[in-house]
Image (cartoon, helix red, strand yellow):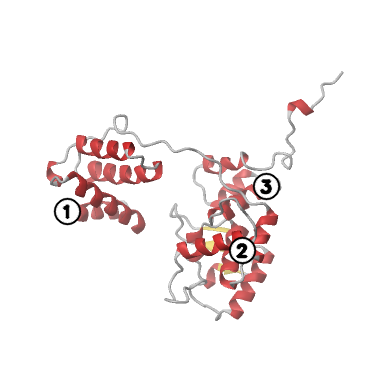
Amino acid sequence: MYEDILQLVTIAAQKKNLKDSTIHTYRQSLKHFFKLTGKSWKELTIADADDFLTAKRLAGAMPETYNHYYAALRFMYKRVLKLNWSEEDLPRMKRDRSLPTVLSKEEVNAILDATPNLKYKAIFAVMYSGGLRVSETTHLHYEDISRRNHSIHIHNTKNRMDRYTILADRTLDILTEYWFKCGKPRNILFPSQATGEYLDISAVNQVLRRSALRAGITKRVTSHAFRHSFASHLLEAGCDIKYIQALLGHLDPKSTEVYLHVSNKTLLGIKSPFDVQEDS
C-alpha cells in the first residue's frame, strides 16, 4: 500500500549514500508509522509525525527505539515530502549517558579461557586486541590480517572509513591456531559453519554470554565490552587519547573521551587533592 513512498525514500537514501542497513531500518520504521497513521502519504502533515512520536514516548519507548523512528520520519519529511521539519518543535529523545562496561585484563583472559570453540575464542581475541566492533570482526577477510605489520585492516566501517588497528602477538597465535585447525579459510576469516557466509552477530553475543557465565563474571557483558576495555586499558597505559581515537575510528573526540570516566585514575597518576599535602 505504501510501497511507492517507501521506494522514493529508498532512492533518496541511496543518493545520500546511506548504508543498506540504515535504509532497511528507515523502511521498517516507516511501515510501522503508516500502519498506525492510516493515511495516504500525500495527506501527511507534521502533526501526524508529532502525534506518532508522542504516542511512542508516552508508551515508554526507549530513547534508542524512539530515535530510530525519529530519524526515519525526519528523513522522509525533509528529503521526500519537502515539508518543514522543525527540530525545536520535534526534538530527539535524549539518551541516558551511562558509562560503558569495562572488563579487567583478568576478566578478558578468563572469558577467552572459558571459550572452548576456537573460532569464537579467536573472534573475542581480535575484538579486544584492536578494539573492533563485532560487525567489523565478523566481516574480516583473510587478507585483512597482516602478520608482518602486526595490524588489522578494517574496511567500510560504521563511519565509512577504512582504518588500521593493532594485532597483538597473543591474538596472532590464537588466529594461527584457529586457521590451521578450522579449514584454513581464505576468503571470509570467520565464516558461518552452516552457510559459509558472514557470521550472525547475535550468535557471537550468545557465545560470549555463555563464556562470561562460565568464567564467573556477573556484570552484563556484550561484544562491545571488548572494545571499551581495549580503549580503557590503552588509556591507563599512558597512550595518547588521540591515538586511541584513531584506532577506534571515532570521528568525534567526545566519543573517545568517555573512557576518561571509566579508566583507573590511579594508573593515570591522578591524585585526589585530599591526598596532596600542602607545603608547610
* Label 3 or label 1, whichever comes before in sequence order: 1
Which element is circle 2 on? helix
Give the residue at x 51% y 71%.
190
**Nearer the observer, disc 3 or disc 2?**
2
Left or right: residue 41 versus residue 53 is: left
Left or right: residue 25 versus residue 181 is: left
Give the residue at x 44% y 52%.
159
Measuring from the top left, give residue 36's x and y in whole percent.
Answer: 21, 46
Measuring from the top left, give residue 165's x and y in whole percent.
Answer: 58, 58
Residue 156 occupies which quadrant of the picture? bottom left
How many labels were placed on the picture? 3
Residue holding disc 1: 2
Residue holding disc 3: 239
Numbered mark located on residue 133 in the image? none
Disc 2 marks a residue whose amino acid type is Ala
Residue holding disc 2: 125
Question: Of residues 193 and 78, which is closer to you in this image?
Answer: 193
* Label 3 or label 2, whichever comes before in sequence order: 2
Which element is circle 3 on? loop
What is the C-alpha distance between the residues marked 1 and 2?
Answer: 45 Å
Disc 1 marks a residue whose amino acid type is Tyr
Give the residue at x 46% y 55%.
161
